[in-house]
Amino acid sequence: MECAANRVFATSGPASCSPSCVASRMPRHCQGCEMRTAAVATSRFANHVGLRSHFSTRKKTTVRTDRFQGCRLARRSTYAVLHEPSYVSRHHNHVNFGVNNQRWDVLGLGQAIVDFSATVTDDFLNTASVSKGGRRVISVQERGEVLSELDGSSYAVNAGGSLSNSLVALARLGLAEADLKQSRTLKVALGGSIGEDALGEFYRAKIEKAGLAFLSEPEPNSATGTVVVLTTPDAQRSFLSYPGSTHDLLADAAVSASGDCRLLVIEGYLWEMPGAREGIGAAIRKAKAAGAVVAMTAGDSGVAARHREPMLEAIALGVDVAFTNAEEAAALAGTVPGACGAEHSARELGSRLPLAVVTDGSRGAFVAARGRVEHVGPHWAAEPPVDTCGAGDAFAAGFLYGLLKGYNVRSMAAFGAQVASCVISRFGARLKEEDAVRLVADAERLPRRWGALEAVDGDVLPLSRGAGLWAMPAETG
C-alpha cells in the first residue's frame, strides 16, 4: 500500500510530463512505510519548460484527496512551496542566512511538526479511537491508515508547532518593521528535529518560505513528527500525534548556535524528548554566557506537570521570561486553579524569574515582575473570534516583539493581546503578512520606556536599555 503521508509529498511534473519523466529522475526511500516514492525535485527538474512559472501562482497547501487527481494536486501544491521564493528573499535580497556568519536576533528550539487538519464526523473519531477533544499518540503505521481513511475529504497540510507559530509571527512583524522604516530585517531562526523524509523537506521549505532560517539537519533513518487534527462540526478538535524519531538534542546545530543569539526561546514540548534536561541546560548556559535573554514556554499543562522539576531547574539556571496559560502556570507553580488562580500563579512564578506571563483567555493576562503583578485586559478587535487555535502563540510573539523594541511591560502585554486578537479573527494559527503590517504601524503609538514595573536601580531584563535587543551591537552604545 502506498504511504498516505508521503504520497502527498511525492513530486510530480506538469500535465505534459509522462510518469517516466518524473520517476526516472528522482527515486527516494520513504522512511515511514518502507516504500519507494518520488523524491523532492532537483534543480534540474525544477527547470523543466514552463514549470517554474506554472507553480509561481499557487499559494495554498489545502488539497482534495480523491484517489488520483487529489494526489496530483497535492504534489503540485507541495512543489510550489519548495520552489517559490521566500517572503524574505522576495523583499529583502540582502539577507544572508547562515549559522556561522550571523548573529541571530531570535533563535527558537522546539518540535518540528507537520499538521494534517481535516473536518470529520463523530463516527470517524470512533474509528480512529480518539475521544472528542482528546489526544492519542499513534505509530507511523497508524498515521498512514488514518490518512488513507481521509481520502476523498479535504484537509490542509501545514508546518505546525507552537513555537513555529510564534517565530513566524515575530519574523513577519520584523519584516513589516523593516519595510516601514527601511531598516534591517529581524533575523529569526528555528531548530527542531526532522526526519530524512519528504515531510521533513516540506517542513523546512515551509518554514524558510515564511521568513525563518531552519538550522537543524535531517536525522538519518528517521521520520518527521506529525499531528492529525480532526475537527468535528461542533468545532471540537481531537489530535492524533506521531512524535517522530528522536535525536540527541546536544548534537543539534541549533543548540550550538544558542551562544550566538540575542533572544533564545525554548518550547516546553522539548521536555518530552530524551536528553532534554542536558540539551536545554547546555543551550541556556551558552545563551547566558553570551548575554542573551532566555524565554521559555510550558507546552501544555500535562507537560508542565510531568516535567515540573527540570523546568524549574531550567528557570533557576537563567530563564528570564516564562509564558504559560492559567492551567500550565498552576501545574508549574504548584498552585490550585481557580477564580484568582492565574494571578496567584503569576505571583508565585514571578518570585523565581524576572518576568512571568500568565494568559487567562478572555480575562486577559497577568505579568509578574519585581514582586508586583500587573493585569492587562484582552484586546477586542472589530472582527469577532473565529478560530482560537494559536492564540497563546500569537500573544507570546507580540510580547517578545515588544521586548525587542524596548516597550514597557504593560505595552508588551498589550501588544501581545493585539496580535492574539488579530490571529483569532482569522482561520489558522499564523499571523498574516498584511495583518503584521497593520499591527506594526499601530504599534508606533505604544510607549517605549519601562513603566510602573521598572525598578529604581535598573531595567527588568538585561540588554533592555535604549534601543533594547532590537539594535545591532554597534547601535546599543
Image (cartoon, rainbow, N blue to C red):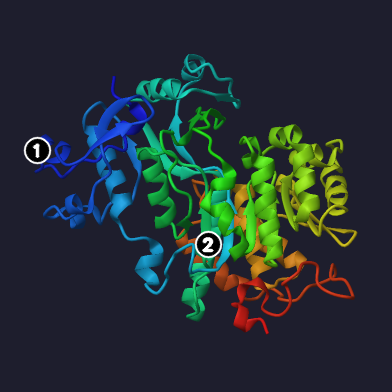
- Assess disc 2: are there few (<14), some (14-19) or many (≥20) residues with their C-alpha within 10 Å of its C-alpha: many
Locate residue 297, reporting x and y percent: 68, 48
Examine the rendered structure and indicate whether residue 74 appears above or below residue 146: below
Q: Residue at x 39, y 24 (%)?
A: 144
Checking the image for residue 423, the label placed there is none
Mark 1 residue element: loop
Of residue 283 and residue 306, the one placed in the foreground of this image is 283
Q: Is residue 416 visible?
A: yes
Locate residue 474, reporting x and y percent: 61, 83
Of residue 377 and residue 5, the one placed in the foreground of this image is 5
Q: Residue 65, located in which quarter of the rendered image?
A: top left
Contact flag, marks 1 and 2 (Cβ < 8 Å) = no
Quadrant into which the C terminus falls? bottom right
Locate residue 241, reporting x and y percent: 53, 29
Examine the rendered structure and indicate whether residue 82 appears above or below residue 235: below
Of residue 343 and residue 235, the one placed in the foreground of this image is 343
Q: Amino acid at mark 2?
A: Val
Q: Which residue is mark 2?
A: 188
On the picture, is 104 further left or further right than 335? left
Examine the rendered structure and indicate whether residue 138 appears above or below residue 416: above
Q: CA distance from mark 1 to mark 2?
A: 41 Å
Q: Which residue is mark 1?
A: 18
- Of marks 1 and 2, which one's residue comes earlier in the chain? 1
Q: Residue 398, located in which quarter of the rendered image?
A: bottom right
Mark 2 residue element: strand
- Assess disc 1: are there few (<14), some (14-19) or many (≥20) residues with their C-alpha within 10 Å of its C-alpha: few
